Amino acid sequence: MKRSLLLLPVLFAGWAFAAPASAPAPSTLIANVANRATVSLDGAWRVIVDPFDNGKDRFFHDAKPKDKSDLVEYSFDASPVMNVPGDWNTQRDALMFYEGPVWYRRMFNYHKRDAIRTFVYFGAVNYKATVYLNGEKLGEHEGGFTPFNFECTSLLREGENSLVVEVNNARHADAVPGIKYDWWNYGGITRDVSLIEVPETFIQDYWVQLAKGSQDEVSGSVQLNGAQAAQKITVSIPEAGVHQTFNSDANGRGDFHFHARLELWSPEHPKLYDVDLTIGNDTVHDQIGFRTVEVQGSKILLNGKPIFLRGISMHEEAPFREGRAFSPEDAQTLLGWAKDLGCNFVRLAHYPHNENEVRLADRMGLLLWSEIPVYWDIDWTNPATLANAEAQLRDMIARDHNRAAVILWSMSNETPVKPERLTFIRQLAQEAHDMDSTRLVTSALNHVEGSGTDPRTLSDPLGDVLDVLGLNEYLGWYGGTPQDADKIEWKSNYNKPVIVSEFGAGAVAGRHGDKDERWTEEYQDNLFQHQLAMIQRIPNLVGLTPWVLMDFRSPLRILPGVQDYHNRKGVISNRGQRKLAFYTLQKFYLDRAKDAK
Ligand code: GCU
C-alpha cells in the first residue's frame, strides 16, 4: 500500500526515515487530538507586542527581577492579555495593520504522572512560532494554517509552568504564501492550544478507509510512537460488527485489511461510524465515514456514481465579528449558509481551514476541497520554499486524511505558467499522491488561451499532473461585460474533470442600481446569471465554487465607501446580508439537486 511511506518506523520521539530523498520528513502530528485526553490552554494569555524584536533571546525566560535593584525591562505579569485562540488584529484596533513579533505567555499548573508523555499541541499559529517551556526551547513551526505539536514531558514541572510563544506574522518572499495575497494577514495563536497526555507508547496516527475502488473492503494502518513498538492492535467498528486484531511490526507499524458491510457516506447520507483503535493502555476513538472517490475519464465518481459538485468558495473569516474564524459556532454559521445555498461542496480557500469546519462538513454531508497557500507568485526555485510547501501539504493530509468529506487536495491557486513553477507543483502533486492514493489532486488555474469574445482553451501545462482541473475566470469583472459570457465557447486540452473554482463580482450589500452599475447587487446578480448559463457549456464540467460565500477583509481592497479593506465578492456580506446573487445561485443549485434525484 503506497501510502505506507508516510508511516515508516518510529521507535522514539526522533523519526528514523528511509524515504526517497525528495519526500518531506514524516509528519510528527498526533492524530485526532480532538478526541484525545487533553488539558486546554485556551483563554487569556499575556502578550508583549515587540515591533523591533527586542525580546529575541530574552523574553522566553519570562524573567522577574530577583530583587529591587535587579533590571528586567519587560514583564509578562504586567502585560495586557489577549484571547487564545484569536488573531491580534481584531482584538486591538492598534494592531489591525500590525505585522511583526508578538510574545505570548501562558502560566499553567501541571501534575506530573508516571508513564505519561505530554505534548503541547497548536491548531495553528500565523505565521512563524517559536515555542519555549520554562525557559527552554521546544521547537519552531512555520506556516499559518497547519497544526503542530512538541513533546514536553522532560521540561514540564510539577506545579507552575511558563509557556512562551514568539509569534511573527511578517511576510517574506521565500515564504508560503509569499509577499502578496488577497486576504488579511491575521496574526496570532489563531486556533486551540492544548496539552496532550498519552501513554509511553501510543497510537500516533492511523488510516481507516475503504480500499481504493472497493465499497466493502476496509484497509488501513496504524503507526505507534514509543518503545513498545510491536504490539497487538485492535480496530473495532461496533455498529458494523467489526472487531479485528492485528500486530504492529518492530517499527510500530501495523496494516490491516478486512471485509465489512458499511453504509456509504455521501452528502445526502453523511453516515459516520464510531471507530475505536486500541493498543495496551491507549485507545483512540473517532467518527469516520466510508466512501470512495475517483476520476473516470472526465467524471468524478462518488461511491461509483458521477457527482455534480454544487459548491461555493469560502475564506476562514469569522461571520459578523470578522477576524480569523476558529470556533464550532463560526463553522456552523458558514457551512450552514453553504447548505442554505443548496451546496454539497465547499472550496476551503486558500489554506487549510480549522478542524471544526472539516469535522462539521463530515457530519453535515458537505464535500471539501482543501488547499495549501501556494498562491500567486512565490519563490519557486528556493529549496526552503519547496520544503515549507511540502511540510504544509504533509500536515494538511496528516490532520484530515480520515475525513470522508475531504475529496480534493489542492496544490496551488492562480500561479504563473513558468517551468520552475511546473517543477515545484509537479513535486507536490506527486507527494500528495504518494501520501494519499485515495483522494484527488487539483489546483486552481487561471491561465487560458483566448481573449475578448474568442473561444477559451484550458491549456495550462500543469493540467498534466492534476486529476481534476480548477478554473478561475473573471469574465465580466476583470474584463469584458457579464453579457460577453453568452458568446464565449470553451475547449480543454485535457480529458479531465473541470471545476470552475472561481468566478464572481463585487457588490455592496444593500446597494442597488441598474445591472451595468458596478458594486450594485444587480450587477453581481446579472453576472451570475450569465456565468451560470456559460459555465454549463464548459467541457468536462463537474462542478463550481463561485467566489465567494462571504465578504472578507483584504489589504488589497481599498476603495473607500465600497471596499474599505474588504473583498466584496461575497454572495453574503460579512454582516450576514444575502445579496441578490445568493438567491440566483440557490435556485440554480436547488434545480440541479432536483434533477439529480
Ligand atoms: C483571485 C484569487 C482570490 C481573489 C479573487 C478576487 O482569483 O484567487 O484569492 O480574492 O481572485 O480577485 O477577488
Image (cartoon, helix red, strand yellow):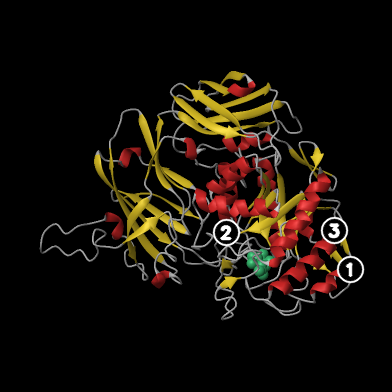
Disc 3 residue type (three-letter): Gln
Image point (64%, 76%), residue name: 511
Q: Quadrant of ligand 1?
A: bottom right
Image height of 277 relative to 492, above or below: above
Among numbered discs 3 and 2, the one appearing first in the sequence:
2
Q: Residues within 10 Å of mark 3 (few under 14, many from 20)?
A: few
For label 2, the SS is helix
Q: Tell me residue 395's x, y (percent).
A: 56, 46
Q: What residue type is labelled 2?
A: Thr
On screen, residue 177 above or below 305: below
Q: Name the residue under label 3.
A: 536
The residue under label 2 is 385
Nearer to us: label 3 or label 1: 3
Q: In which quarter of the image is residue 385?
A: bottom right
- Point out the frontmost of discs 2 and 1: 1
Q: Where is residue 495 in the image (x, y as percent from the top left)?
A: 86, 51
* Depth check, front residue: 91 or 98: 91
Dot 1: element: loop
Q: Residue 455 carries which label?
A: 1
Q: Does the residue labelled 2 lie within 8 Å of ligand 1?
A: no
User: Sequence-wise, which precedes: disc 2 or disc 1?
Assistant: 2
Q: Is residue 388 visible?
A: yes
Instruction: Give the CA distance from mark 3 to mark 2.
Output: 38 Å
